[in-house]
Image (cartoon, rainbow, N blue to C red):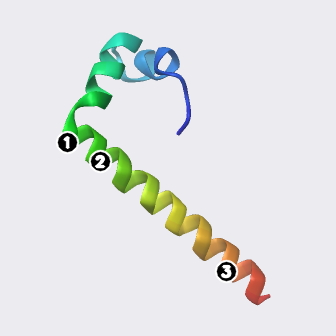
Amino acid sequence: MGLPTEEVGPLVGASGRTVRRWRQRPEMRADICKVRLRLLDGFVKSFQTEEAR
């Protein structure tokens, strides 16, 4: 969600360095991409709903 890895690490019980390594894994990168697409899709739908009003 745009937080630095140093802030994400403590939230998930890991160091920022570990989070950076996790982000390099292909399966994690794919999951991050899916989440970003879902968030973008939700934003677009809410924007379209606002425009329809």
Residue 22 image position (x, y, % from top left): 27, 26
Residue 39's place in the image compared with 9, above or below, is below
Specify the amino acid type for callout 2.
Asp
Q: Distance between the Cα atoms at labels 1 and 2?
A: 6 Å
Instruction: Indicate the quadrant where residue 15 lies.
Output: top left
As drawn, is 34 to the left or to the right of 50? left
Instruction: From the viewer's side, name the closer residue of 31 and 13.
Output: 31
State the residue position of label 2. Answer: 31
Labels 1 & 2 near each other (Cβ < 8 A): yes
Q: Distance between the Cα atoms at labels 1 and 3?
A: 32 Å
Residue 12 image position (x, y, % from top left): 37, 23
Instruction: Indicate the quadrant where residue 26 lies.
Output: top left
Q: Residue at x 44, y 61 (%)?
A: 38
State the residue position of label 1. Answer: 27
Mark 2 lies on a secondary structure that is helix
Q: Which mark is residue 48?
A: 3
Q: Can you see residue 42?
A: yes
Residue 28's place in the image compared with 38, above or below, is above
Q: Can you see residue 15?
A: no
Residue 43's place in the image compared with 7, above or below, is below
As drawn, is 21 to the left or to the right of 16? left
